[in-house]
Image: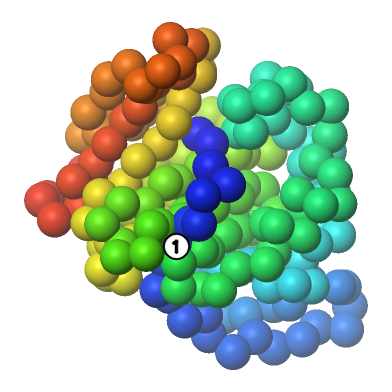
Amino acid sequence: MSDQTAKPTLSIKPKKPETDSSHDLIVSKSIPLTTRSGFEFHVRPVASADKEALAEFFRHVTRDDLRFRFLSPIPEVGDEMLSYLVDVDHDHKEDFLAFDIDDKTIIASAMIGANEDKSVAEVAIVVHADYKHRGMSWTFLEYVANEARRSGIKKLQSIESRENHAAIELEREMGFTAKSYPGDATLMLLEFDLSAAAPTG
C-alpha cells in the first residue's frame, strides 16, 4: 500500500506521551491490539523522536515491500522521506506505528492522508519482514480504518502494485472494491466507503 505526496490526513489527537530515558522513542499509552492468531502488538501515532527508530525499521523491510510501499524501486528510505513520515499534523496526515509489546521495536507503519474536506484519504501500510504472516496487516488496517472513520474521513483508498497480490486480496476480503488505477496499468486502486459498514473479519 502506498501513499501519494498529495496532502494526506487524519483528525486524531495523540495522547500526551511519556518519555522513557532507556531509549529514544516516545512511549505513550499505546493501544494494545490482538490478531486473530493471538499475536499482540501496540499502536500509537508517530512522534518526531521516532525518526531514527523508523530508519531502523525500514532496514528490516524487504526490497519488494519497499517497492510496494513507495511504488518505486528505492534501495533505502532516506532522510528526506523519514522527515516526511514523522512530520504529521495529526489532522490531515497521520502515521500510525505498530510496536512489539516491548514498545520499542517498530514492526509496522500505516500512513494515512486525506484531502482538505476529508472526503477521501489514502492509506499505506508496510510490515517488518520478521513480523509478517501473523495476521498483523488485517488487524492494523482495521484499526486505522476505524480511526479514520472517527476522524470524519468518508472514503479510504489504497494504491497497490498489481504484483502485490497479498495486499490486494486482504483489502478485497475486508470489503475494499478494486479497479484499475487511472492512467497506470501497473497499479490497482482499492477503495472502502467508511460511511458504510466497518471492515469485518
Q: Is residue 37 above or below residue 34?
A: above
Q: Residue at 69% x, 64% y: name it.
A: 86
Q: Residue at 40% x, 73% y: name it.
A: 11
Identify residue type, mark 1.
Thr
Q: Residue at 76% x, 66% y: name it.
A: 50
Evaluate whether residue 162 shows in this view: no
Residue 18, x across and y down, in percent: 69, 88
Q: Between residues 129 and 7, which one lies in front from this camera angle?
A: 7
Q: Is residue 42 left or right of residue 116?
A: right
Q: Is residue 63 left or right of residue 169?
A: right
In the rendered image, which quarter is residue 165 located in?
top left
The residue under label 1 is 9
Q: Is residue 141 above or below residue 133?
A: below
Residue 124, x across and y down, in percent: 51, 42
Q: Is residue 174 left or right of residue 28?
A: left
Helix, strand or loop for disc 1: loop
For the C terminus, the image quarter is top left
Residue 37, x across and y down, in percent: 43, 39
Evaluate whether residue 127 shows in this view: yes
Residue 188, x across and y down, in percent: 39, 20
In the rendered image, which quarter is residue 96 located in?
bottom right
Query: What is the basis of the colouring in this image?
Result: rainbow
Q: Between residues 12 and 16, which one lies in front from this camera angle?
A: 12
